[in-house]
Amino acid sequence: MAVDTMRSFGPPGPDPDISMGQKLMELERRARLIHALQVAVVWVVLFMILGLALMLLNFDPQYVRDHFGFVLQGLWVTIQLALISITFATILALLGALGRLSTSSIAQGVSGFYISLFRGTPLLIQIYLIYLGLPQIGRQFQELGMQQLGQLFTLTAFQSGVLALSLNYGAYMTEIFRAGIQSISYGQREAASAIGMNRMQIMRRVILPQAVRIIIPDIGNQFIAMQKDTALVSVMGIWELTFRANRLARQESKFMEMFVTAALLYWILTVVSSWLESRLERRLAHAYER
Amino acid sequence: MRKSYLAVTLLILASFILASCAQATPAPAANKLEDVKNRGILIVSSDPAYPPQSELVEDATRAADTKCSSDQQTADELRGFDIDVSKEIAKRMGVEVCFVTPDWTLITAGNWADRWDISVGSMTVTPERMENLYFSQPYYTTPAAFFVHVDNTSFSQPSDLSGMKVGACTGCTYDAFLAGTLQIPGETMNYVVKDAQFTGYETDLNALQDLTLGDGVRLDGVLTAEPTGQGTIADGLPLKQLGDPVFFEYLAAAFDKNSTLDPIPLAQEVSRILAEMHADGTMEKLSQQYYGLDLTSAAGEFDLTQLKQW
């Protein structure tokens, strides 16, 4: 009957369809909450197992309490190293990716060689080569009478560390940048050039702003990896987390105590940075939210 | 827009370079000794990984009027036998002492690029190291001894470890002793342990740590400095010394042969100061303080001229 189909035009009352939908959403929300709780329980259990494992170690908690503050002082050096290096690495990676995607054979060759060399050799060896090797090249310049230029090759331990980390991570991140840039559809380039933009403008105004959103999670990932690789620069005698923990451990042969302390600090550091990274990611996604 | 990127990159690079420029050497000196006296600081390398020779001090504060740069440690930030010897050398030269703490590998490699002037790090005088480094008068000797797990009953003397699993630091004198290639000027070697299954470690302490896992679990024995091994036993590690020391090492300060300025006058001056410290009993007092026995008299009698360095 026609009267039935007219129902929705009547005065507003409880709609069975809407209330059913709300009930379904409520159920789903509860299911999600229960799931999250279950995950949390698993975490707590794993934490307890880890704690238990630590108690099984020959472990002296008092030593950790006494020396925690001194190890903690190294955290700031670690953060500095990682922050400065990731900045340089990002710049290198952008230049490297532009080189790889460019039509110039020289740019392609240079960036290809750079990636191959620094991805193909261990970071620790690179640190040794930069710290020990560069000054020897500088010496040759000094002997040719170029004092100031030669002096530049003798980097301090901190500078050598930053240089090695930047070059190494820049090489890995070049591929990330390249993939990000290539993921932007070709139609956008064509559209941009149709309205008269040149290649530089297209890259800066159209491609990069979109590519950055895709790249950010990967850069965050590299940043976290780098925070832990800063431990390698301790070989040059920089008093960061690992150096302090390691040297204190040797004082009274308290290796487990100090290594667990350092591990915990690195873990906290990476948890905080991945939280920051996810916030940044969400911010950049605003424009794409519906 | 491309230009602004480039400008920023160049700016950052330039600041990086300028930062390193700021540490350029001051007025030119004729040799390393003069350079040290002009600067008023003696930069000593010492890895604080080897107590009681060198360890870090946790609650130290930097002296306000120090001439040491920010990436160097001041006198109060480290302590130990090597550190006290360094301080005494600097004091007798009339300069301030500053410490840097690079890894042992970087110290023995030579080619220090003038980052530090001298190593006072209990370095054994060996012919291989003399290719890159000059040595001073030795300041003490270290007995090298084998250590085994306390539970072990089957070994009674070092030679019993022949063919067994023995650990030591890689690339150090103990490694060379086990390989039967160690030569120490002024000493005849008796390689008592033959054909050991060698395991190398970053430092001796890692080897000793591995030995504590149990008798024969990963290692049957470790060759290390007697004071180092005894030190870990005092810390509560379940180890014991096996027999008498197998050899003695002469430990000296070292200088980079490839430094820009001639290091020989500095090496001679430090040797003179060390000989003086042997003669006036300072060295023996320090040895008694840190090791409870005199490890210095043989080093004082060592004839430096037999090395034919200069």
Image (cartoon, rainbow, N blue to C red):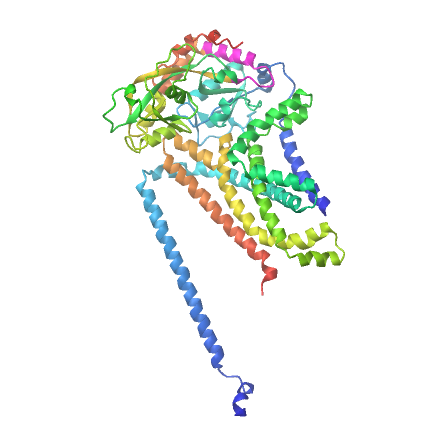
Taking the view exactly as shown, the residue that stands out farthest to the right is A196
* Residue A193 found in image quarter: bottom right
Residue B16 belongs to magenta span: no
* Residue A137 on image: x %, y %: 62, 25
* Residue A197 on image: x %, y %: 74, 54
* Residue A287 found in image quarter: bottom right
Does residue A167 show up? no
Q: Can you say whether A95 is above or below A235 in the image?
A: below
* Residue A192 on image: x %, y %: 72, 57
Quadrant holding the C terminus of chain B:
top right
* A191 or B210, nearer to the observer: A191
Is A75 on the left or on the right of A290, as rendered?
left
Taking the view exactly as shown, the residue that stands out farthest to the left is B153
Task: Identify which residue is drawn at 63% across, 45% down.
Answer: A97
* Residue A185 found in image quarter: bottom right
* A166 or A98, nearer to the observer: A98
Task: Identify which residue is drawn at 49% across, 13% down.
Answer: B136
* Residue B18 on image: x %, y %: 65, 32
Task: Identify which residue is drawn at 25% across, 23% down.
Answer: B155
Q: Can you say whether A271 is above or below B198 in the image?
A: below
Number of marks in the rendered image: 0
Does residue A21 show up? yes
Q: Can you say whether B15 is above or below A143 in the image?
A: below
Which residues lie in the magenta part? B255-276
